[in-house]
Amino acid sequence: MSRSSFAATAAIAILLAGAAIGAQEQAPPRFGERVEVGRIIVDARVLDDRGSPVPGLTADDFKVSIDGKTARVETATWVGGRDTGLGIAPLESTPYRDTGPPTGPGRLIVFLFQKDYEPSRIFGLMQMLLKSRNVLETLMPNDRVAILSFDSHLKIWTDFTNDVERLDRVLGHDLLLERPPSVEASSAPSLVERLAPDTGRLTYGIERALELIGEALEPLPGSKSLVLIGYGFGRLGFSGVAMENDYAPARHALVAARTSVFSLDVTNADYHSLEAGLQIVAEETGGFYARTHLFPDIAMRRLAGALVGYYVLFVEKPESERPIHNIEVELTRRKSHVLATSSYSEGGR
């Protein structure tokens, strides 16, 4: 090989080596397999000892445990009214009101009354019908309320509406003394669109009624509230009260619909067996249970606080093949009462 040919070959080799080195330097580093982290939404209501809502919290204020293991809370977003500094006085005197203009979708509240004319129940029902009218004073223009009742079957009195006069007439008179009117589906949001009165007339168990309500609420956005005012349910056996087989689908439907049940017991007793059903459905859906025969105003004040707003928590979901997961929500830096669902199902919520 001539000297000139050798020099040219060497130059080409040096250029190729430099290009290879440059390509190696520019090539992006390789990582392991990409890990997708699932997330779940947890609705949490936070109340102080007086029943007033506690806004202003951040993700760092919450601790969420799933199946006993701490799960990371990515964000915590408050949805609802603002704390005006007034707190919540008894509804008869100073109802809680948000002083800001209504923005976005309002609250969706369903009242479900268990009707029974048994002496230990009817007085409490009448009392709570009257006190429920005070909740109407706290409604903002974009809030919607539906009223249902259950005795021998499910009855629908109103679809979601903000017609306070109509709602007040149902609570103050019609529900006890009249028959339900013909109810047509309202403009969105609508409960009756997916839960027709004809279906209600064929619903003979309170558990099945709860399931149908949950299914009807599921497509609607955000967290919903179901105020269950009644005397309870379940089946009394030798070992205590057991939930009927229809209860599990009802619980699943309510949790999937992000619907918290607030159970207000109208029975004139310090304890009775059927209260177990009211307690269980409230605990498992992120609501609360309260007796009303002695201090109804305290129960209503706490209800008003819970209805003001809630936190939407985005929580990292651990890898697990379990179909149902236990979940617990606590506060890290202050003492208050946290209301959140006690479990969630894969493929549900």
Image: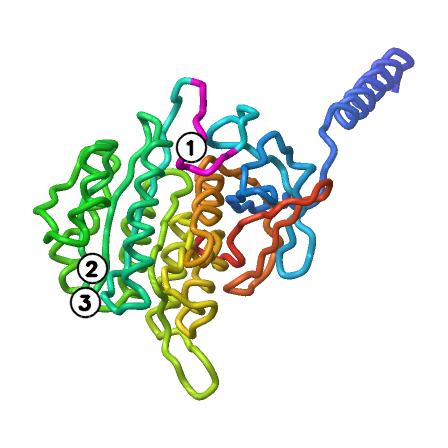
What is the chief secondary structure element of the magenta stretch?
loop
Estimate the x, y position of residue 31 in percent, counting from the top left: 72, 40
**Of the numbered discs in the image, which one, if any, rests on residue 339?**
none
- Give the distance between the C-alpha atoms of the residues marked 1 and 2, in whole angstroms: 34 Å
**Of the numbered discs in the image, which one, if any, rests on residue 152?**
3
Estimate the x, y position of residue 289 in percent, counting from the top left: 47, 57
Could you tell which of marks 1 and 2 lies nearer the N-terminus? Answer: 1
Q: Which residue is mark 1?
A: 93
- Give the distance between the C-alpha atoms of the residues marked 1 and 3, in whole angstroms: 36 Å
- Label 3 Cα neighbours within 10 Å, binned few <14 / some 14-19 / many ≥20: some
Pick the residue in front: 97 or 24.
Answer: 97
- Residue in the image at 81% along x and 25% along y: 21
Task: Specify the segment rendered in magenta.
Answer: 88-100
Rendered image quadrant of residue 17: top right
Q: In this rendering, is residue 189 above or below 321? A: above
Q: Residue furthest right?
A: 3
* Number of the front mark, 1 or 2: 1
